[in-house]
Amino acid sequence: MIPVNEPLLGDRELEYASECIRTGWISSAGRFIEEFEQKWAAYCGMKHGIAVSNGTVALQTAVACLDLKPGFQVIMPTFTIISCALAVIYNGGIPVLVDSDPRTWCMDVSQVEEKISDSTRAIMPVHMYGHPVDMDPLRELAGRHKLLIIEDAAEAHGAEYLTGRGKGTSRWSRCGGMGDLGCFSFYANKLITTGEGGMVLTDNPVLAGKARSHRNLCFRQEKRFYHTELGNNYRLTNLQAALGLAQMERIDEIIRKKRWIGKAYSERLRDIPGVQLPVEEAWARQIYWMYGMVLDKSTRMDALLFAEKLKAKGVETRPFFLGMHEQPAFHKIGLFRNEKHPVAERIARQGLYLPSGLTLTETQITQVSEAVRKVLS
């Protein structure tokens, strides 16, 4: 079976992890945490990095910095992982959903303005499967309506977006570094992994201070066990940070491998009828975190059946996300019951992604592509 993902770890990770064990710095203090925070923030073009225990709590920590009051709203795509909506709900807010762009599968930015109300406090773009959201329109909207932007860049390590197009000030910016707060996951299937782990980035020292306090139970420096605010224990360990820092040393190599995988698949699959493959818009440099594909109804097959047939040929896959508006858990609490988002609904039923891990070989890519072709022929 060709796995959908395998982490690629090397000698440097072993060296740094061994240092943690030799010195005893295995918990939530140590040199690797601060260095990882500083280097990842700088890589993404931000000033402050706050390492946390996973990507879900990175989002929860970022939303906590907004000091939402009950009924305040955050606009986000329906087509995303449930962590995005949970981060808002757990902080007392209400998620407001928009549909997906049919080309990139990211949020449809043209739908955002109509969802802005007096209760809106932030927009949460999610860079989907390695392709950036079209950020300029969102940044303009946020500036005009005095909203904050929380980027979910969990799937877009190193992906880039061309900001300022048509204004004479265009430049490439990295995902996670274009909003007021950027959130990352370092789960085992991400380009940079710490096993579990995440980070919040910001240029704002006040937001950075709030995030650092929130991830550490809101301890006070002058009176440690006296609490004026409620926080959480979301700390990353030095041992985990050591793994992330080691991989940062070869981030360019990792991105080159991911982009090669994406292009190798596209070369082999582009002539198959009835299949939508990932795009790379002119304003984007995507990193193909996972190589997705969406079947047209002309194939007379949904993603579930497609996955079963590929599994029989030794190829592991994963389904696309199911939209937040179709989640029974949210219907139970009165959210999204009558909403329809047709693009997200279509790609959720017709989409899956192929093996995309860093250990993937050219021979395996060819085997997967041949399996796809046979199933769809």
Image (cartoon, rainbow, N blue to C red):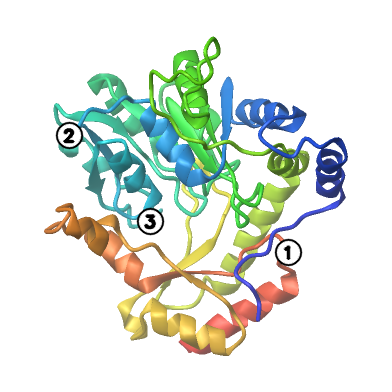
Quickly name the residue at label 1: 359
Residue 363, position in %: x, y?
74, 75
Label 3 neighbour load within 10 Å: few <14, some 14-19, many 20+? some
Which is more toward the observer, 351 or 58? 58
Q: Left of 314 or right of it: where is 109?
A: left
- Residue at figure coordinates x 34%, y 67% from the top left: 348
Cα distance in 3D space between marks 1 and 2: 46 Å
- Label 3 or label 1, whichever lies nearer to me, is 1
- Residue at figure coordinates x 18%, y 59% from the top left: 332
User: Helix, strand or loop at disc 3?
Assistant: loop
Which is more toward the observer, 118 or 364? 118
Q: Residue furthest left?
A: 338
Q: Amino acid type of disc 2?
A: Gly
Quickly name the residue at label 2: 71
Q: Earlier in the sequence, mark 2 or mark 3?
A: 2
Residue 93 got which mark? none
- Label 2 or label 3, whichever lies nearer to me, is 2
